[in-house]
Amino acid sequence: MKCPVLKYLALLVFSAWQATNPAYSCDITPPPGSDLGVYVNSLHDGQKMCLGAANYYANQILVLANNVTISGSGIGETVVLGSGSRAFSIRGEGVTMHGFSLVGHNGLQKDRTYGILAYRTDDISIWSVSIDYFKISIGVVESTNVRLQNIWASNNGDPDNESAGGTSGSDPHLWITGSENILVRWGNWEGQADGFKPGGDGELAAYNSNNVRVLDTFVMHSGASGIYFVNCDSCEVSRTRVHAADGWGLDIVAGSENFRAEDNHISASRFGSVIFHEDLNGSGRFAYNLLTSGNNSSGHTTCSGINVRGEPENLELVGNTNTDGPITCVRQ
């Protein structure tokens, strides 16, 4: 039999601790249905804003304060309807955002360029967030120490890009450029392959960056390659599932030195499982990767495995399996 007095005392102790613990106290609590801009603008360094189980609105909000938290009640519980060229643009350092769904709202999807953009900032943590109906779900530009964990992204891109015969290109879910120490972990990035050409939406792309790591993640039905690293040094893809990419599963090119891929499962890529520029990247490490289920389904290449431009023997290959052909082959 439970003791109501002890239960009440425990609640009092917890409430007193909660009130003095900054991780749980809320400095600003906007009412349901609010436009969040004015509330975010009023955040001071180190403060926390809490969002309830309701709908809110975000239109080109600048997060300028440092070490602030925007905390929702959970994916699907707190829904932020985002509009403008970016719903949130993070400029302050030490910003944390978590526990909400961000859904594109108003105007054309092609004009909602970013759901969340981290721009020239440091120490950013975005976790347990779903993002839908933006051209690019998340952008990381000239930033360091960014953690994107348990992100559920879908329905991205400019629909006009994917009309029959369209050639205007693909829109990534995640666009990283000029950045360092970026962690992408857990979650699911669901793209939209158009089915008739490499193009469409959903890839994870990193350009001219260092130490970008994609770990324990699902990348499914991307309209272009599943993961696209261009001059991305000391970058890694491990324990990740890449399925049904409309280009390559892993597209690692243009001087991406010290690349490593371990314990991944890559299947049903329209081209081969991997394209790797050994002649520009130098050696890479591929260990214990499983390549299955119709990679090179379009017949675009002669190899369903790791297509190497350069010398395959220079790669470090350990324990890989390809059910549809050789592990590596030379690509001209």
Image (cartoon, rainbow, N blue to C red):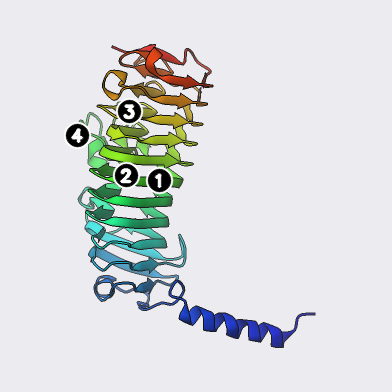
Which type of secondary structure does the marked residue at label 3 adopt? Answer: strand
Give the residue drawn at x 28%, y 71%: 40
The type of residue carrying mark 4 is Ser
Along the line of sight, the residue nearer the viewer: 283 or 127 = 283
Residue 301 horizontal side relative to residue 114, left or right: right
Q: Which mark is residue 174?
A: 2
Q: Earlier in the sequence, mark 2 or mark 4?
A: 4
Give the residue drawn at x 27%, y 49%: 139
- The answer to whether residue 1 is above or below residue 176 is below
Q: Are marks 3 and 1 in contact (CB under 8 Å)?
A: no
Q: Name the image quarter holding residue 210.
A: top left
- The answer to whether residue 92 is above or below residue 167 is below
The type of residue carrying mark 1 is Val
Which tag is nearer the camera, tag 3 or tag 2? 3
Q: Are marks 1 and 2 in contact (CB under 8 Å)?
A: yes
* Residue 274 at x, y percent in the picture: 39, 23
